[in-house]
Amino acid sequence: MLSFKKTCVLCCVILIGGLPLAMSQQNSRPRTGQVLLDDPVFGISYDPSLNQYERVPASLDKKCHLGGGHWIYAHASRKDSEYFVVMGYGPRQEGDSFGNSIWIKGAECRMDESNWTLSGIPPEGGYRNAQTSEVLPGLDAPKVCENRPREEYCRYILRSHDEEAVLRSLVEDGIQRAVKAFGKAQFRKKECSAEALSKQSDYPIVQMELRRFCANSD
């Protein structure tokens, strides 16, 4: 999947490690064979002219200053908040496109890198704080790097049942969007082998939801 070298969206707003990038809506989709993208939820390499995702609506584009040319890879709603994983590609862009997670509450838009959002780990001793909260998973959470030499291996500990529920909802929706984009048989072929599932080990919630999908699908 996802590796921390993986794809996430470049946006105009910098929150944690984001970079600015103006993207043009017109001609933003690469031609067949011109470029391959990695989807920011599962890391599947694909041609965006063949496997199509839903476009980010103009209202979200404007509110979060994305600049056009983005797609939605996961979406969840909870209480007064909406959450998205999006990615875009601009006609003058070189190299990878990077995905971002988005939290919308009222007029506010907050963003983070999607690989960070997806890397949350359930706490070993369970959740001690039963207080409910609305938050983008991983936003402002401390890094847990497990004595690894490179920062891309850092993750965070999920802080509440609510935070985990949002993350699971995003992954569940991401699976359904990928099934629609690739077809169920093709998605299962890409993500349900033992080798593919083992590659999700740095993303335990993603791995758990994929295992559930693969076990329950015909």
Image (cartoon, rainbow, N blue to C red):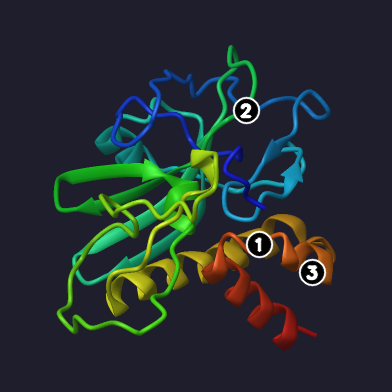
Q: Secondary structure at mark 2?
A: loop
Q: Is residue 35 above or below residue 73?
A: above
User: Residue placed farthest to the front in the image?
Assistant: 147
Name which of mark 2 and mark 3 comes first in the sequence: 2
Using residue 58 as the reference point, say whether residue 206 is left or right of it.
right
In depth, the one of 195 and 22 nearer the eye is 195
Q: CA distance from mark 2 to mark 3?
A: 25 Å
Q: Secondary structure at mark 1?
A: loop
Q: Position of residue 188 (x, y in %)?
A: 79, 69
Residue holding disc 2: 96
Question: Is residue 216 something one can see in this rendering?
Answer: yes
The C terminus sits in image quarter: bottom right
Q: Nearer the viewer, mark 2 or mark 3?
A: 2
Question: Is residue 193 something one can see in this rendering?
Answer: no
Q: Position of residue 62 (x, y in %)?
A: 29, 33
Callout 3 amino acid: Arg
Callout 1 amino acid: Gln
Quarter of the view holding residue 183: bottom right
Q: Position of residue 69 (x, y in %)?
A: 50, 30
Residue holding disc 1: 200
Dots 1 and 3: beta carbons under 8 Å? no
Q: Residue at x 34, y 84 (%)?
A: 126
Name which of mark 1 and mark 2 comes first in the sequence: 2
Using residue 204 as the reference point, say whether residue 114 is left or right of it.
left
Q: Secondary structure at mark 3?
A: helix
Q: Is residue 195 above or below residue 151?
A: below
Callout 2 amino acid: Asp
Q: Which mark is residue 188?
A: 3
Q: Nearer the viewer, mark 1 or mark 2?
A: 1
